[in-house]
Image (cartoon, rainbow, N blue to C red):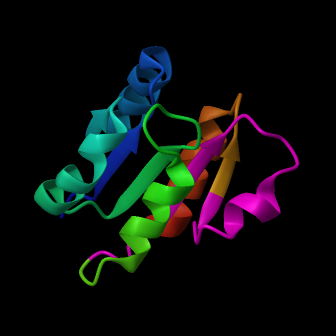
Amino acid sequence: MVKRILVLDDNQDILDIVHETLTYENFEVRSTGESDEVMPLVEEFTPDLVILDYRVAGTNGGELCQQIKAHPKFGNVPVIIFSAYINRDAELLRYGCDAIINKPFDLTELVEKVNNLIS
């Protein structure tokens, strides 16, 4: 069965690259640039993993991570947070995410972290 990944980033270039890379790796990918679409998409798409940009309009990826982790049906879904804030890992981990990828990031690192969390 194909694993599903939901990606949130308000930078369209990053969304496109991540979407293309993960699709190439045989994942089913849904992407959005809108933070208010994340929880409805989680409910509808039932992802096996969620990738959230930390800094997005409306709310931050950490708060969205907490909402996903608090959800009775999706609390066990791994969450990766993208962050341009170097040396903030401890702060970001308090949101309950399973991994952090610092921007700019290497696509190999992205694929490795996704595969480690999703398998």
The location of residue 3, given as percent across then percent down, is 27, 59
Q: Position of residue 17 (x, y in %)?
A: 46, 23
Q: Toward the viewer: 33 or 109? A: 33
> Does residue 78 appear in this view?
no
**Please, is residue 63 above or below residue 103 in the view?**
below
Q: Quadrant of the C terminus?
A: bottom left
List the single residue furthest toward the left. 44
Task: Describe residue 101's horizontal placement relative to residue 68 as left or right.
Answer: right
Q: For this rendering, which residue is in front, 25 or 91?
A: 91
Q: Where does residue 110 sit, x and y in percent of width and height?
A: 58, 44
Farthest residue toward the right? 87
Left-right relation of 118 to 88: left
How many numbered callouts?
Answer: 0
Residue 103: within the magenta? no
Furthest-top residue in this view? 13
- Position above or below: 78 against 44: below
Position in image of residue 111 (x %, y %) = 54, 46
Q: Quadrant of residue 89?
A: bottom right
67 or 4: nearer the viewer: 67
Q: Left or right: where does residue 45 sit relative to residue 54?
A: left
Magenta includes 94?
Answer: yes
Q: Residue at x 42, y 74 (%)?
A: 69
- Magenta-highlighted residues: 74-99
Q: Is residue 55 visible?
A: yes
Judge by depth and name the residue closer to the eye, 2 or 100: 100
**Residue drawn at 18 percent across, 64 percent down:** 1
Taking the view exactly as shown, the residue that stands out farthest to the bottom is 72
Q: Is residue 41 above or below residue 46?
A: above
User: At 44% from the left edge and 56% from the top edge, which residue is drawn?
Assistant: 64
Left or right: residue 56 compared with residue 83: left
Q: Residue at x 60, y 67 (%)?
A: 95
